[in-house]
Amino acid sequence: MFSSPTAAYLGGIFSGGTYYLALHSENPGPGCDNGELSGGGYERTACPLDHDSADEGEVIYNSDAVVFPIGTDNLGPVTHWSLWDDSESGAPAIYGEFQSPVTWNEGTRFVIQNGNISSVLLTS
């Protein structure tokens, strides 16, 4: 059973709304307003979510692949991600760091496979 704040948070994320994954070239910070990619074919992309219980809390993860459009320019190293409630503005929900930077080159797609975006909500 979740604590009230955790239940409310998960209820907001899993209430049937769509969340969008943003990519960053640096740590976006708590407001997620640093280093979001722009231009070159980049756009926030819908990210289907699911969650499972773990010893340390609830793990939120992408439940299907997230496929970004083909890059029309070299978009540089992608180091971080953030999850938003809108495709262009909105409010950030969570953010995290990739294990290692990934370069997104012109003519290629940036794809995040099922389960590769995750965050743990501490419940204990």
Image: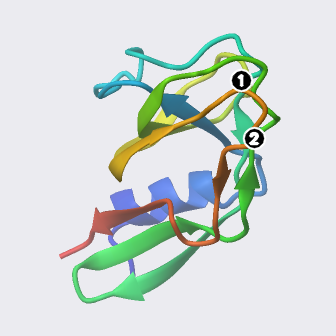
Amino acid on which the number 1 mark rests in the picture? Tyr
Observer able to see residue 98: no
Asked whether 73 or 27 is in front, the reply is 73
Q: Residue at x 22, y 80 (%)?
A: 56
Q: Position of residue 54 (x, y in %)?
A: 33, 87
Asked whether 5 or 53 is in front, the reply is 53
User: Which residue extends farthest left?
Assistant: 124
User: Which residue extends farthest top?
Assistant: 39
Density class for disc 1 (Cα within 10 Å; few <14, some 14-19, many ≥20) is many
Q: Position of residue 41 (x, y in %)?
A: 78, 20
User: Residue 70 sits in which quadrant?
Assistant: top right
User: Residue 38 sits in which quadrant?
Assistant: top right
- The residue wearing badge 1 is 42
Q: Where, quadrant-wise, is the C terminus in this rendering?
A: bottom left
| Label 1 residue SS | loop
Reply above or below: 57 against 12: below
Whether residue 124 sits left or right of residue 110 in the image: it is: left
- The residue wearing badge 2 is 68
Observer able to see residue 71: yes
Q: Where, quadrant-wise, is the N terminus in this rendering?
A: bottom left
| Label 2 residue SS | loop
Whether residue 70 sits left or right of residue 60 in the image: it is: right
Q: Residue at x 70, y 31 (%)?
A: 44
Reply above or below: 70 against 67: above
Q: Residue at x 76, y 48 (%)?
A: 17
- Tell which circle, 1 or 2, labels the residue nearer the N-terminal end: 1
Q: Residue at x 51, y 66 (%)?
A: 116
Amino acid on which the number 2 mark rests in the picture? Phe
Rounded to the nearest angstrom, the CA distance separating label 1 from label 2 is 7 Å
Q: Are marks 1 and 2 in contact (CB under 8 Å)?
A: yes
Q: Position of residue 52 (x, y in %)?
A: 49, 83
Whether residue 58 sits left or right of residue 42 in the image: it is: left
